[in-house]
Image (cartoon, rainbow, N blue to C red):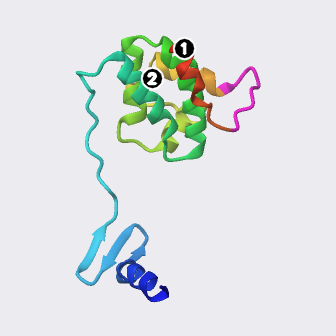
Amino acid sequence: MFAAVMLRRAPVRCLLSSLAVRRGQVTDATGTYDSEIQLPPWEERRNETQQIKRARLVYESRKRGMLENCILLSLFAKKYLSSMTDTQLSQYDRLINMPSNDWDIYYWATGAQDPPEEFNNEVMDLLKEFAKNKDMEQRLRQPDLEYLFKDAQ
């Protein structure tokens, strides 16, 4: 059994040992490649119902690249997504899905940096105000999803 486990892991170990990551570059036996992954340009989904769009945005608000944004954006989505207009939904979709760094979104929301003009809109204003947490709520984890099913009962 031990031999079978080792054989299954061998290709992974060989792959990992053949690559060396150094300062943003991946090097293997055939040469050096830039490891920066180019993200495809964001395109708004045109044939999506409002219900599907809200559900997708709830998911995308919860599954971020960093925990701080997972918590901030999932709580923001819980509070505001259900009441957003079509324009606001599009602004929020663009904000969280355009190729950008999650740290940028966090810095813009917390006021550490000014957002670029394309994101300086009413949704960003709502997010900035929400991030201030004036009610001093404990925001230690994402909200449970039961709130999504209250109207279904």
Q: Give the side of residue 153 with respect to residue 25, left or right.
A: right
The residue shown at (70%, 33%) is 139
State the residue position of label 1: 153
Name the kind of residue labelled 2 in the image: Asn
* Disc 1 element: loop
Work out how far the residue at label 2 is from the one at label 1, CA to CA, in angstroms.
38 Å
Mark number displayed over residue 120: 2
* Disc 2 element: loop
Q: Residue 77 at x, y = what percent? A: 53, 25
- Image quarter for residue 33? bottom left
Q: Give the side of residue 73 with respect to residue 30, left or right.
A: right
Please, which residue is most extreme toward the front here? 1
Asked whether 137 falls inside the magenta stretch, the response is: yes
Asked whether 147 falls inside the magenta stretch, the response is: no
Residue stretch rendered in magenta on the structure: 132-140
Q: Residue 68 at x, y = what percent? A: 60, 41
